[in-house]
Image (cartoon, helix red, strand yellow):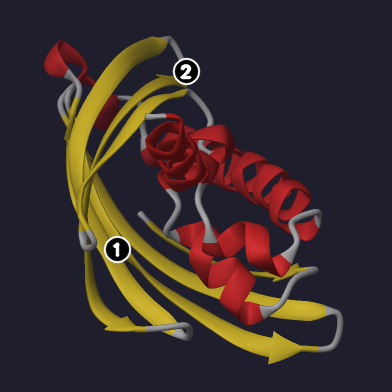
Amino acid sequence: MKMSGEEVIAAARETVWKALNDPDILKQCIPGCESITRHSDTQLEARVIAKVGPVKAGFTGIVNLTDLNPPSSYRISGEGKGGLAGFASGGADVRLEDTDGGTKLSYDVDAQVGGKLAMLGSRLIDSTARSMATQFFEKFADIVGTMKPEAAKTPAKKVAKKAAKKKV
């Protein structure tokens, strides 16, 4: 499956970049996301429940960020395993550019599925992927568009840790 698109986010490029790298924001935006754990600055682990046609499965996967060029671009790649439902793997090239009204986010995705998911057919998989991308970007634009630039620089967990240290 190949998919590409562009979205304009009503926020500064640095704010969009920080949000794209904030597990708390991503968890809110990814449809069916149960958890995201940051293992390092370039590796995340996610648990997502996805429904593709009659198949509903929980996927756990590792996501790696490479070709980092902050705050302009990166490559995100990974593989998710969904037990009997199958697996999904692939990657996306993500680019950010300043534009009138905020930041233009462009993406090119290349993904493969296997197992029961692959038997559903490419039309159903493609339409589900496009629907999930639309849901992600609508939620992401809503959240990031209302953020103050300072808020994106200090993820919620860091704020909570600082507050906890002050209490001790």
Q: Which residue is mark 1?
A: 76
| Badge 1 amino acid | Ile
What distance separates the C-alpha of mark 2 from that of mark 1?
Answer: 26 Å
Q: Is residue 125 left or right of residue 76?
A: right
Disc 2 residue crowd, few under 14, some 14–19, many 20+, Cα 10 Å? few
Label total for image: 2
The numbered dot on residue 87 is: none
Quadrant including the N terminus: bottom left
The residue positioned 48% from the left and 32% from the top of the image is 124
Which of pointers 2 and 1 lies earlier in the amino acid sequence?
A: 2
Locate residue 73, reporting x and y percent.
41, 81
The quarter of the picture where residue 117 lies is: top left
Locate residue 61, reporting x and y percent.
19, 36
The residue positioned 54% from the left and 44% from the top of the image is 25
Disc 1 residue crowd, few under 14, some 14–19, many 20+, Cα 10 Å? some
* Circle 2: element type: loop
Mark 2 or mark 1, whichever is nearer to me: 1
Q: Which residue is mark 2?
A: 53
The quarter of the picture where residue 102 lies is: bottom right
The residue positioned 29% from the left and 63% from the top of the image is 76
Query: Is residue 123 visible in this depiction of the protein?
Result: no
Locate residue 77, reporting x and y percent.
23, 59
Residue 128 or residue 69, whichever sits in front = 69
